[in-house]
Image (cartoon, rainbow, N blue to C red):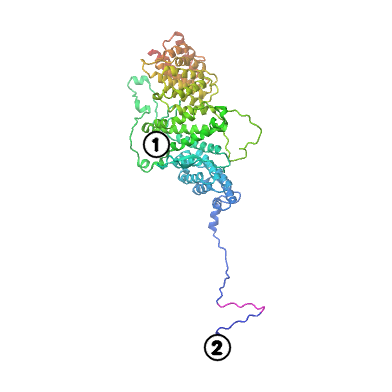
């Protein structure tokens, strides 16, 4: 066979005919396959145990849909989660970690409907989850909240404030633990950093208010929204700090380590040396130990950034940033800018912004008080901000509200979910009182000469407000009396304090005062009396108004009767305190009213509860004299059974000692 023939046999070309099927190649791959379904009964059985909602989706299905690219699917998943968890609350505990992480992740979702559904779901979860349950997962929630507050999208920033509202309402303590990060976020929401020309050499950044025309609300309305949340946040910080004592007339709170254990003394047993009184152990007082020792977990591990506003350096740094911004907000809303012709009249929106500015400064002033002894914060605040406050805040003081006629036209805020309306009526008096509180905290006895100008303005405003204060509520009265007390401490001579006490007494004489208001006034007068009584006899110059108030207390007690037992108890305590100090005016008035107080038919003694009766019986010991008529009334109270036998024995013992 020749080579040509052999080559043709090896490489033969197959001739294809029309209509015939193409033959398969020898190296062709067979792609046919067969499938069979695999069933796992146990797995199906486990899925069947999980509860489902009306769309037959369980918790795992709904959480998996949160990662879907479609906003509609995620929105429906959030609604389904709320529906499922409301029907089966036990699912929350079993899947808490996954629920929190998935809901927090959509705080920064691009779709506004998804974010709105997430806020509603978070609000529902906050009512079901306790603080100790969510505490391990709160760093994740806080991180997503910070991401939303600093997001580039205006809509996400606006919705982040709604998330903040829910968390402040439900978990204020957990949120304030991360104050160092959140406070910076608040600043960035209304301002931006700018390198000042004067500070370039020191490389220090300054902040200035920012204006964003892309927002759905005006710049002032946006700042009002942010400052309202900042005020709530700082209020939570103040409320959570046990070291801060409230100003004004609130009683000092006992330390959490102070436990008062009242003891009852039987004089007969005590006289026979059968009962020993441990004075300090039962008084609840503990020696104050000034020690720098702290546990390592509280001091070494936590750096300055994590301490937040509890660190004096952090607090000073935040004040240096926020106060200039607040002054800029004030200048924009001040009467000189908004309505030069109207003087000190303010529109409602401007006044809300100014109120938030002053409230934030007032809360920051409270936070500085716990560092005042070491860092001299009051002196630092006065040196840095008194000039600006006098120039801007006191320029148009006092402020009043401009009443505008409302025309029938469409409200721009109606139908706009980004517009926040004031939930409370505008209170111009509270604005003025907050300003007074801030300013008087910067004054002292040593600076009285320099501050006399604006202090006289505040003193006149306080006096006029007290004299015409029949419609004041308890919050206004508490702030007003706090400013009055501070003014009396700054200038302690009788010429300055007597008009203030007289103005408070004018308010006290008003009829139909609310019970909280009456209680605050009683506390104020009691505090003034105790302060005055502490002075030595040589320099004591008792206030005539205060003596008149003390002399009227027994008659008020006799007239009050059983109409308000709590107020009667307060009057008895004050009368007992003054009687034990041998106050001449009060003892004379108590002597004249004793027959009515101890009347066996309708006297105060027989109408009040047992504890108040015991205090009234003890007052008999302080009476200057015991006439026959009074002894007859006391005898009839014992014979008719209007007081208990033990109290009658106590009364006989007191009379025997007299």
- Residue 614, image x and y in percent? 44, 19
Magenta highlight: main SS: loop
Q: Quadrant of the N terminus?
A: bottom right
Q: For the point 38% across and 21% down, which residue is it?
A: 266
Tag 2 near tag 1, CB within 8 Å: no
Is residue 648 visible to the viewer in this orientation of the structure?
no
The reply to whether the magenta stretch includes residue 21 is yes
User: Which disc, if any, is residue 643?
Assistant: none
* Residue 161 appearing in the image: yes
**Of the residues under marks 2 and 1, which one precedes in the sequence?**
2
Which residue matches tag 2?
Answer: 4
Q: Secondary structure at mark 2?
A: helix
Q: Which residues are magenta?
A: 18-26
Tag 1: Cα neighbours inside 10 Å, few (<14), some, or many (≥20)? many
In the structure shown, which secondary structural element does the residue marked by tag 1 occupy?
helix
User: Most extreme residue toward the bottom, as rendered?
Assistant: 1
Q: Quadrant of residue 538?
A: top left
Decide: is 47 above or below 517.
below
Q: Quadrant of the C terminus?
A: top left
- Residue 242's quadrant in the figure? top left
Closer-to-camera residue (70/36) = 70
Q: CA distance from mark 2 to mark 1?
A: 104 Å
Residue on which the image places disc 1:
312
Query: Looking at the picture, does residue 629 appear above or below residue 459?
Result: above
Q: 287 or 262, which lies in front?
A: 287
């Amino acid at each position: 066979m020749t080579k040509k023939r052999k080559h043709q046999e090896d490489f033969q070309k197959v001739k294809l005919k029309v209509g015939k099927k193409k033959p398969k190649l020898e190296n062709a791959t067979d792609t046919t396959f067969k499938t069979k379904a695999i069933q796992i009964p146990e797995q199906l059985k486990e899925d069947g145990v999980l509860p489902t909602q009306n769309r037959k989706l369980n918790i795992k299905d709904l959480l998996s849909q949160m990662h879907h690219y479609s906003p509609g699917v995620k929105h429906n998943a959030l609604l389904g989660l709320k529906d499922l968890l409301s029907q089966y609350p036990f699912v929350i505990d079993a899947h808490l970690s996954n629920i929190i992480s998935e809901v927090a992740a959509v705080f920064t979702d691009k779709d506004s409907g998804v974010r709105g559904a997430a806020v509603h779901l978070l609000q529902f979860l906050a009512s079901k989850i306790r603080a100790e349950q969510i505490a391990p997962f709160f760093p994740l929630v806080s991180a997503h909240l910070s991401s939303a507050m600093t997001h580039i999208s205006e809509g996400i920033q606006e919705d982040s404030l709604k998330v903040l509202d829910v968390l402040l309402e439900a978990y204020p303590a957990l949120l304030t633990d991360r104050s160092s990060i959140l406070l910076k976020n608040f600043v960035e929401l209304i301002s931006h950093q700018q390198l000042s020309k004067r500070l370039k050499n020191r490389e220090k950044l300054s902040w200035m208010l920012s204006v964003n025309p892309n927002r759905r609300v005006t710049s002032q309305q946006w700042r009002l929204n942010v400052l309202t949340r900042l005020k709530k946040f700082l209020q939570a910080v103040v409320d959570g700090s046990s070291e801060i004592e409230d100003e004004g007339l609130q009683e000092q709170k006992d330390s959490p380590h102070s436990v008062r254990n009242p003891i009852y003394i039987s004089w007969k047993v005590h006289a026979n040396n059968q009962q020993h009184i441990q004075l300090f152990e039962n008084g609840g007082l503990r020696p104050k130990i000034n020690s720098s020792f702290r546990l390592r977990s509280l001091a070494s591990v936590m750096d300055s950034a994590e301490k937040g506003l509890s660190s004096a350096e952090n607090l000073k740094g935040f004040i240096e940033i926020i106060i200039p911004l607040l002054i800029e907000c004030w200048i924009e809303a001040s009467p000189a800018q908004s309505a030069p012709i109207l003087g000190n009249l303010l529109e409602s929106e401007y006044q809300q912004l100014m109120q938030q500015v002053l409230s934030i400064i007032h809360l920051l002033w409270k936070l500085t008080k716990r560092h005042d002894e070491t860092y001299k914060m009051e002196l630092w605040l006065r040196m840095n901000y008194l000039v600006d406050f006098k120039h801007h805040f006191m320029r148009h003081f006092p402020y009043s509200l401009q009443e505008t006629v409302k025309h029938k036209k469409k409200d721009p805020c109606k139908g706009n979910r980004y517009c926040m309306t004031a939930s409370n009526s505008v209170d111009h008096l509270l604005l003025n009182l907050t300003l007074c509180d801030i300013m008087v905290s910067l004054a002292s006895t040593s600076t009285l000469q320099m501050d006399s100008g604006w202090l006289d303005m505040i003193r006149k405003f306080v006096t006029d407000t007290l004299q015409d204060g029949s419609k004041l509520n308890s919050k206004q009265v508490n702030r007003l009396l706090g400013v009055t007390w501070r003014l009396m401490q700054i200038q302690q001579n009788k010429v300055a304090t007597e008009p203030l006490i007289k103005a408070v007494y004018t308010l006290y004489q008003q009829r139909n005062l609310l019970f909280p208001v009456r209680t605050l006034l009683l506390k104020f007068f009691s505090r003034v009396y105790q302060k005055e009584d502490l002075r030595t006899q040589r320099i004591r110059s008792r206030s005539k108004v205060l003596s008149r108030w003390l002399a009227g207390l027994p008659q008020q007690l006799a007239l009050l009767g059983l109409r308000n037992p709590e107020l009667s108890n307060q009057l008895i305590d004050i009368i007992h305190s003054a009687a034990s100090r041998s106050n001449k005016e009060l003892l004379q008035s108590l002597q004249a009213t004793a027959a009515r107080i101890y009347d066996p038919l309708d006297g105060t003694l027989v109408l009040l509860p047992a504890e108040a009766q015991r205090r009234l019986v003890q007052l008999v010991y302080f009476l200057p004299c015991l006439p026959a008529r009074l002894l007859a009334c006391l005898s009839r109270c014992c014979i008719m059974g209007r007081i208990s036998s033990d109290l009658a024995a106590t009364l006989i013992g007191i009379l025997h000692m007299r």
